[in-house]
Image (spheres, grey):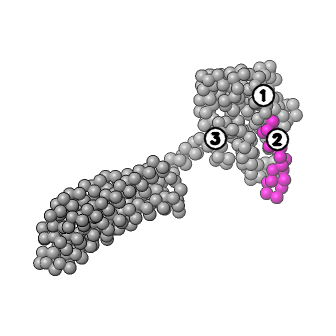
Amino acid sequence: MKNKAAIEFAQLKHLLAVNDRTVLASAVLAIMLAWIESHLIPTHILVIWLSVMLLVSIARVAISRYHIKHPTYHHELIKERLMIFRVGLMLSSIIWGVISLVVIHHGLLEQQLFVSYVIAGLSAGAVVSYSIDRISAMTYLVFAVLPTLFGFIWVGHEISMPMAFAGFVYVAFSVYSINSYHNSLVESILLRRQAVEREEEIKRLAFYDVLTSLPNRRLLSDRLHHALVMSRRSGRRGALLFLDLDHFKMLNDTLGHSMGDLLLKQVAERLKQCVRESDTVARLGGDEFVVMLEDLSEERAIATQEVEQITNQILEHLNVPYQLGELEYISTPSIGAAMFGDHGESHDELLKHADIAMYQAKKSGRNVVRMFDFDMRADVPIKRSAH
């Protein structure tokens, strides 16, 4: 299903890209044909035919430009737009089929040959331009070329009959070419899609945590570096929150790692609900999460209040019991906070100080928040035991 949607999206994109020049070529040739045949075909017939051709051409260009200007990735809407394009192309090809029959009826042999030459050229261009969508290319052949060939058969001239036979050979070759081009283009689309998917997968593995799909340490470091630069430029403050789940090791040891993974996924979802779109929630590994808050107030006191408000909301959300399969489980976090600038100028320094504040939250009885203070560094053991 995904491959089909990707193919139809690529088909529509290609058809819209070539539409203007193919319609322009068709309109120019229509004007030339009307001028050349004006002394043989009644004027009112040519005027009506040319007017309809130009109106359809203008409508096709207008619709395609609207679709280019307002792209969509919705599968049903893409299918609808493909159908609209095919209908417009079918109308153009029918109009060419009609004029070929009109010329065959009114014109001399040389005029008939000229019309067949023009339509053959247009259909050859259609094979090249529209083969990405087999339906569009086939539609053009059926409604533009076949009426001319049947008209030659109807005339029954000693030259028109061989021309009709040659035309059917041309149609057969065109059908073969359409299928070949179509298969090659579709294969190219699928190969490009696979390449993009592999690139996205590599990026996901490099920058996102596999279990929770949150940014990992590497992506957090990049975002934190950028946030610090923007904070210094704008004067807006920021903060880093270091979270650790209390007694998580006990959960893994008693209920198994699958239950622990389930808890981590639910914690990740709850954390994302507690922050703004501009903030970042990351998982460093194990039961350690980091929340980066950006665009806080320029005033230190107000920014501190904003951090307190968000951390209280996090505590409230993470204290709600979790449903781990059939088991209702209560987990609490210990949170350490460090402010941009006040508690560090680099991402390494901020992470270290937020971790120290989190350790103090553990020491204070867990399920609390502690803001970093430089005096805390003297109370940090050289090697901390498991949380």
Q: Is residue 61 magenta?
A: no
Q: Which circle, 1 or 2, is nearer the viewer?
A: 1
- Disc number for residue 215: 3
Q: Earlier in the sequence, mark 1 or mark 2?
A: 1
- With respect to residue 110, does 276 lie above or below? above
Residue beneath disc 2: 316
Q: Quadrant of residue 276?
A: top right
Q: Is residue 315 magenta?
A: yes
Amino acid type at circle 2 is Glu
**Mark 1: which secondary structure?**
helix
Amino acid type at circle 3 is Pro
Foreground: 321 or 298?
298
Tell me the magenta residue range.
Answer: 312-331
Residue beneath disc 1: 305
Measured Cα–Cα span from mark 2 to mark 3: 23 Å
Query: 10 Å neighbourhood of mark 2: few (<14), some, or many (≥20)?
Result: few
